[in-house]
Image (spheres, rainbow, N blue to C red):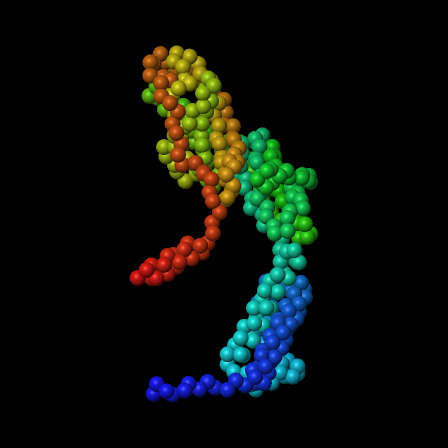
Amino acid sequence: MENEEIKFPEFDEKNFIEKEKRKAKTSFIVFSFGIFMAIICHILWRNMDATIRWPLCFLLAIASIGFLGKLLQILKIDIRKFGKREWIASISFYFFTWLAIFILSVNPPFYDASPPKIDIVLLPNIQQVNGSILILAHITDNSGIEEAILKIGNNNYSMKKDEEGIYYFEYKGNKNEYFEIIAKDKKGNEEKFEGLLKFEKEIASVIFPPKTPLNASDKIEIKVSKNISEENFRVYYVINDEEINATKIDENEYYYIYSTSPRYVGWEAGKENNIKIFIEVIHYFPGIMRKYNNTIYVGNYTVETAEDKNIGKEKSPVITDLPQPRGLRTPGFELLFLLIALLLLRKRK
């Protein structure tokens, strides 16, 4: 057994060269066919409705696989020598060539058919008459924004853009007005957003105790409409150059109810104190750290206080549930990290 000679099969050079030539020629034809079909689908994509163009182009690419065998025969490829593996490799090579070229061709810088995306925030949603509403628009597009026009009534305004890329305009009014934002990208695609600017006379009211002068334990209530913002907001007042936060104590179907008293720093005993009440609405766009805010002026009031030694002793309450910066969400990455972790654990075992 030890002296037996190992015999290697005879190398068929001619058959090997013929096989490699067939592979190379097949790859070139399949690659060219993938590019050709991507060009055809790109032309169709430009002339079809956005709701149907992707499924139709995809189905056309799949259906074209049936022509691949005939094309190889026409170009003198002997497909009778193809095995299952060669067919799978050729079809996969065609499909992924088509997919890569097609996706590149229908996206910038080669083509842009998608209009800008507009994310609108009004601060506040409802403003007091003669107050101002801050119109904020986060407008994004893969080819860049050319301009953003704001229409209110018969007037057109050019929206300004800050360093964070947010378009803004502050509008002061005394009656409800419909508005429209028209965003145009550098390829000429447009997107529109319509909305309503709301102004009301009484979106907040102040309820003082029936007796005066006030002691440190007396409560002043401020009722604020829930509709002024979809996010939490801050109710505060300014008294003798001090800013005091009111505390939310209750709510009903239409209003939030806030409370404060003369016990906070800024109030002075035995005097007529002048207070100016405001509501601050706040918003953070995802991935942007800048705070956007606007105020509602509720009113100016004069309040008489008693000679109470506890007046003006406590610090302003701290509000902890206001909007905060938030990062961009990346759906799917959590699952990816979980799968990687499971694979690593499996390898260790």
Task: Give coordinates of residue 68: x percent, y percent.
Answer: 61, 78
Tell me what residue is drawn at x 37 percent, y 57 percent.
341
Rendered image quadrant of residue 324: top left
Classify residue 242 as left or right of residue 306.
right
Tell me what residue is drawn at x 42 percent, y 27 percent.
245
Classify residue 198 as left or right of residue 321.
right
**Front-most of residues 82 and 315:** 82
Is residue 64 shown to the viewer in this render? Answer: no
Tell me what residue is drawn at x 48 percent, y 86 percent.
9
Classify residue 102 as left or right of residue 327.
right
Can you say which quadrant of the picture contains the N terminus? bottom left
Can you say which quadrant of the picture contains the C terminus? bottom left
Identity of the residue furthest to the front in this view: 3
Task: Give coordinates of residue 234: x percent, y percent.
Answer: 45, 32
Tell me what residue is drawn at x 50 percent, y 25 percent.
299
Rendered image quadrant of residue 207: top left
**Front-most of residues 237 and 224:** 237
In the displayed structure, 5 sits above or below 121; it is below
